[in-house]
Image (cartoon, rainbow, N blue to C red):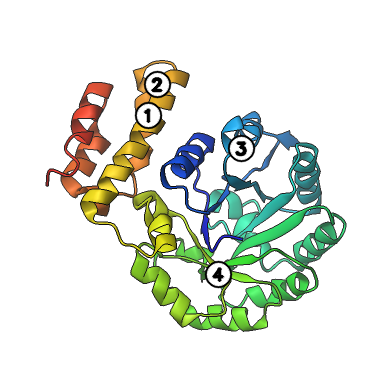
Amino acid sequence: MSFIHFAPVQGHTDAPYRHFHHNSYNSPLTYYTPFIRLEKDGLRSRDIKDFTSSLNDSSHVVPQIIFRDKTELNTLVKALADLGATEINLNMGCPFPLQTGHGRGAATISNPNIGEAVADTVSNNPDIHFSVKMRLGYADPNEWKILLPFLNSISLRHITLHPRVAKQQYGGDVNYECFDEFLKESVNPVLYNGDVKTLEDIEDIKNRFPEISGIMIARGLLGRPSLADEWERRTELSREERLEKMLNFHTDLLDYYNETLCGESQVVAKIKPFWEYAENEIGRKAWKAIKKAGNIAKYHSAVAMIGRD
């Protein structure tokens, strides 16, 4: 199992992005699909397309699902198994109100009925490797203590813990004390997730928690796509080297969108999020120009500003 895992981000880490990131950096990452949910009692066609894409063939991709009860959980597991899934990640940590308001994501952590459902589902599907991504709780950082006994009763590939509660979203301090307590009490391997953006961050977390089995990164890899490769090679690239590799990655992805999408407005809308988390990497002037670009010509002009600051 790879030490660095690329967490999914809706609107960013779809099959083309994962494919060209893997081709550009070739580090032994585990990738996860943006969460798959039920819509009218079935999988959304775009989720099926993303999971079954031929672009997934060259990398290790795990589908992630989000659910609010045992029925949704089992329906999703069966649907993905029918599509050939041998690994499934259970999203029990999404902090966004659109999901928690319907009892999904982080709202499942303090629900013992869902904890029991997860234990039953994992036990009843021995041919599938399951993992869990979660937070400390929805509002209380001790809510994980309700869920953990159920997770300790089953064998999981790993549990990824983001040491915040859902109400914090991505702001406020992470709770290292609760993470350490969780790490000591979990019988399953634990990954750390949250605010990892540099090589120093990775080393700090490894040194603080030497027992962890890995680190899951989302925004840090979106902003600095070379991060996992740099860590694996134990070599920090210069900013110029990082930008060169990032621009090559961007060119490959943009070429793909030009070939597969219809019209420049679709292409611009699809490619602009590539830079959303990269302000520190590419410079504020270029980042703002990209954000404002309304057509492909202005977009290319904005991208050409990268590295000139």
Determine the residue positioned at 69% across, 72% down: 188
Residues tagged 4 and 3 counted as in contact (Cβ below 8 A): no
Residue that extends furthest to the left in the rendered view of this protein: 309
Classed neighbour count for the residue bearing mark 1: other residues with Cα under 10 Å, few (<14), some (14–19), many (≥20)? many
Classed neighbour count for the residue bearing mark 2: other residues with Cα under 10 Å, few (<14), some (14–19), many (≥20)? some
Local SS, label 3:
loop
| Residue 102 appears in the figure | yes
Q: Earlier in the sequence, mark 3 or mark 2?
A: 3
Distance from disc 2 to disc 1, alpha carbons, whole Å, reads 6 Å
Residue 176 in percent (x, y) is at 48, 79
Determine the residue positioned at 44% across, 16% down: 262
Checking the image for residue 254, the label placed there is: 1
Residue 74 in percent (x, y) is at 81, 49
- Position of the N terminus by quadrant: bottom right
Residue that extends furthest to the top in the rendered view of this protein: 263
Residues tagged 1 and 4 counted as in contact (Cβ below 8 A): no
Residue 305 in percent (x, y) is at 16, 38
Local SS, label 1:
helix
Q: Earlier in the sequence, mark 3 or mark 1?
A: 3
Local SS, label 2:
helix
Checking the image for residue 184, the label placed there is: none
Checking the image for residue 258, the label placed there is: 2
Distance from disc 2 to disc 4, alpha carbons, whole Å, reads 44 Å
Res. 45 image quadrant: top right
Checking the image for residue 57, the label placed there is: 3
Residues tagged 2 and 1 counted as in contact (Cβ below 8 A): yes
* Amino acid identity at mark 4: Ala
103 over 158 or under it: above or below: above
